[in-house]
Image (tube, rainbow, N blue to C red):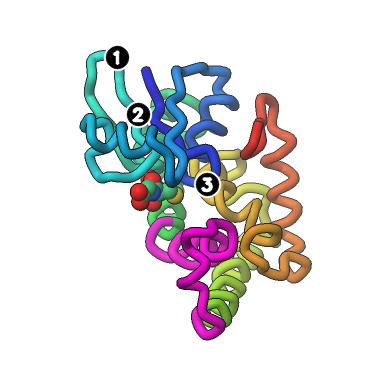
Amino acid sequence: MRLYSMPSSGNSYKVRLLLSLLGRDVQTVDVEYQTQALDSAKAEGHMPFGKAPVLELDDGRLLPESNAILCWLGEGTDFIPADPFHRAEMLSWMFWEQNQHEGVVAVRAALQYYPHRRAQATPERMAALLESGHALLQIMDDHLSSREWLVGGAVSLADICLYGYTHTAGERGGFDMARFPAVNGWLARVAALPGYKGLTA
Ligand SMILES: N[C@@H](CCC(=O)N[C@@H](CS)C(=O)NCC(=O)O)C(=O)O
C-alpha cells in the first residue's frame, strides 16, 4: 500500500498515527503544499478529490478522505468498537470532526501557519474562528470531563481522528487550551499510547 500524505497536515497525520499505533508500515509519498510532488500526484491521478491523504491499495484502488482511510485500516482492530451503538457514536464524532471541528480549528491554524494562506487571515475572520473554536473545544471538554475516551471505555478511531487537529490547536491555532483541562488530559492519554508518533516524527 502507498499513502499520499501531506507532512504538515492533521488529516494526513491521523492516518500516519493510526498506522504507527497498529505497528503497520506503508510506503509514504510526501505531497506537501506548493511542491512538485503534490502537483504530480494530482496530475497522475493519485488524488481523486485533489486532496491528501489518499491510500493506494496494492491492487491500485484509491481511497481518499482521512476518516474513510481510518475506517479501512481500523477494520478488524480494537480501534473500532464491537458494540454497534458505540460504533455509530464513533462515526458521529468523526462526522462532527469533518463538518464542524476541522472547518474551524484546522482552518484557523492553517491561516496562521501556511504563508500562502495568511492573506486570508483577516482580523474579523480570525476572531470569529477563535470564538467558534473555543465553543467546539468546550463540547469536547464537557464530554471528556466524565470519561477517558470519546466513545465507550476504550480508545477508538474517534480519538485518533479528533487528535489530528486538536493537539496543535493551541500552538498552531492560537486557541486558549488552558480552558480545556479534560481535553488536555485526553491529549496526554493519546500521546501515551504504545506506538504513538508525533506529527513531525
Ligand atoms: N476531508 C478531507 C480533507 C483533506 C484536505 O483538505 N487535504 C488538504 C491538506 S489538509 C490538501 O490536500 N490540500 C491540497 C490542495 O488543496 O491542493 C480529508 O479528511 O481527507
Position of residue 7 measured from the top left corner of the image (x, y, whole percent): 53, 38
Q: Identify the residue position indicated by label 3 in the image.
A: 10
Q: Report if residue 155 lies within the magenta region.
A: no
Image point (70%, 58%), residue name? 171
Give the crowd class for mark 1: few <14, some 14-19, many >=20 residues within 10 Å: few
User: In this image, 58 relative to 149: left or right?
Assistant: left
Q: Tell me whether circle 3 and circle 2 mark residues in contact (CB < 8 Å).
A: no
Asked if residue 191 is positioned above or below residue 22 in the image, the reply reads below
Position of residue 56 measured from the top left corner of the image (x, y, whole percent): 31, 24
Mark 3 residue element: helix
Tell me the quarter of the picture where residue 201 sits: top right
Q: Is residue 88 visible?
A: no
Tell me the quarter of the picture where residue 41 sits: top left
- Work out whether residue 40 or residue 77 is closer to the camera in this orientation and state it: 40
Position of residue 39 measured from the top left corner of the image (x, y, whole percent): 32, 39
Residue 156's disc is none
Residue 55's disc is 2
Looking at marks 3 and 2 on the same chain, the residue that comes earlier in the sequence is marked by 3
Image point (30%, 38%), residue name? 64
Q: Mostly what secondary structure, the magenta segment? A: helix
Asked if residue 95 is positioned above or below residue 83 in the image, the reply reads below
Amino acid type of the residue tagged 3 in the rendering = Gly
Amino acid type of the residue tagged 2 in the rendering = Leu
Q: Report if residue 119 lies within the magenta region.
A: yes
Instruction: Estimate the spatial distance between the alpha carbons at disc 3 and disc 1, rounded to whole Å.
Output: 24 Å
Q: Identify the residue position indicated by label 1 in the image.
A: 58
Instruction: Estimate the spatial distance between the alpha carbons at disc 1 and disc 2, rounded to whole Å.
Output: 10 Å
Q: Which residues are magenta?
A: 98-125
Q: Tell me whether circle 1 and circle 2 mark residues in contact (CB < 8 Å).
A: no
